Amino acid sequence: MFTFLLILQTLVAAALVGTILMQRSEGGGLGVGGSSSGLMSARGQADFLTRSTGILAFLFVALSIALAAVAATRDDGTEIDDSLIGETAPLATQQEQAPAAPEAPAEDEGAPIAQ
């Protein structure tokens, strides 16, 4: 159920972005211009896009509330996985416990030994 609502939410969000970008802006930025001789007049197109934006916005908010309600009632993941308890210690703990081996100083074969 959650996955279905999440996919539906994604589709509604993409459609909402698309209808917002198709609307004519005040400055004529990203708006798609329409001619009055087309299938829909400029006024009819504006009314359709305005109504579509309102409906999609309502669906987006309703789906957000529904997803929050479903997520709050889900009981997945409340169980603690204890399959690794008692296994080997993490690497950082192992390094702290093991004494560091002293490194032998590098000898230079060609240099004289100072006494």
Image: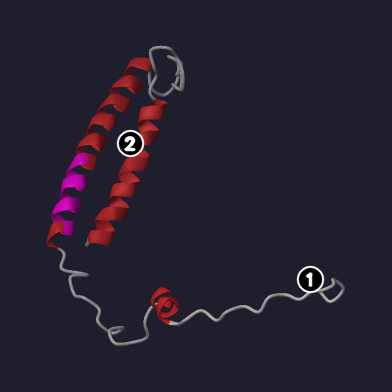
Left or right: 63, with 29 as reference point: left
Q: Who is closer to the viewer here, 43 or 55? A: 55
Tell me the magenta residue range.
61-71
Q: Quadrant of residue 21?
A: top left
Characterize the magenta stretch by its predominant secondary structure.
Answer: helix
Residue 89 percent location from the top left of the image: 36, 82
Residue 88 percent across, percent down from the top left:
37, 85
Question: Please, which residue is most extreme toward the front here?
Answer: 115
Residue corresponding to mark 1: 114
Would you place residue 74 above or below residue 100 in this image? above
**Most distant residue in the top direction:** 27
x 34%, y 47%: residue: 11
Report crowding for label 1: few under 14, some 14 to 19, many 20 or more residues within 10 A (C-alpha). few
Viewer-proximal residue among 102 and 15: 102
Viewport quadrant of the C terminus: bottom right
Q: Which of disc 2 and disc 1 is earlier in sequence?
A: 2
Tell me, yes or no, whether the highlighted magenta stretch contains residue 70.
Answer: yes
Picture coordinates of residue 18, whole percent (x, y): 39, 34
Left or right: residue 48 versus residue 104 is left
Q: How far separated are the C-alphas under marks 1 and 2?
A: 82 Å
Q: Amino acid at mark 2?
A: Leu
Type of the residue with mark 1: Ala
Q: Is residue 15 above or below residue 81?
A: above
Badge number at residue 71: none
**Residue occupied by mark 2:** 16
* Vertical placement of residue 108 versus 57, above or below: below
Residue under the point 21% across and 76% down: 80
